[in-house]
Amino acid sequence: MNVWIAVIATGVGCYALKLGGLVTPQRVLADPRVRRFADLVPVALLTALIAVQALAQNGSLELDGPRLAGLGAAVAALLLRAPFLVVLVVAAGVTAVLRLLL
């Protein structure tokens, strides 16, 4: 039953967040500080997600060499302006090869 309470609460929260965006006055949305915040929030959330996925396992910090090398390879591929699919394949390939060798 607790799972359904969490699912319903999350759904209500998402709906309220969407509704909040729709009923916010245009003058508030036109403020440069709000625009800057809205531009930076997705970047911050994605960075946090990457950090958690790359550095944590089972709720604790774990520095996994192959995983970090795959992340580094992904960053290098992004700096070389590779397509996203290529970035994923490079990161997975480097991680897999290092896990196989180590």
Image: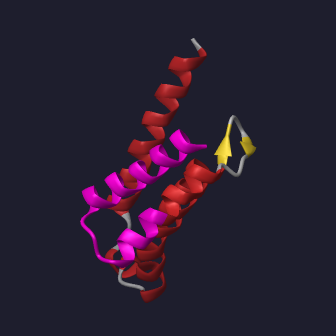
Viewer-nearest residue: 4 or 19: 4
User: Which residue is at the front of the view, 49 or 68?
Assistant: 68
Query: What residue is rendered at 32% in x and 52% in y?
Result: 89
Residue 96: percent from the left, percent from the top?
46, 44
Q: Quadrant of the N terminus?
A: top right
Residue 94 among magenta residues: yes
Corner quadrant of residue 59: top right
The chief SS type of the magenta part is: helix
The residue depicted at 57 percent of the width and 50 percent of the height is: 66
The residue shown at (45%, 53%) is: 94
Image quarter where the C terminus lies is: top right
Pick the front one: 1 or 84: 84
Q: Position of residue 38 (x, y in %)?
A: 43, 72
37 sits to left or right of 22: right
Specify the farthest residue to the front: 101
Tell me if I can see residue 42 in this picture: no
Bounds of the magenta segment: 73-102
Q: Is residue 20 magenta?
A: no
Coloring applied to the structure:
secondary structure
Instruction: Name the residue nearer the viewer: 80 or 19.
Output: 80
* Residue 88 percent across, percent down from the top left: 34, 54
Q: Is 61 on the left-hand or right-hand side of 74?
A: right
Question: Compared with residue 94, is residue 43 higher up or lower down, i.e. above or below?
Answer: below
- Residue 19 in picture, x, y percent from top left: 36, 52
Would residue 87 be found to the left or right of residue 61 on screen?
left
User: Which residue in the rendered view is the most extreme toward the right?
Assistant: 60
The answer to whether residue 29 is above or below residue 48 is: below
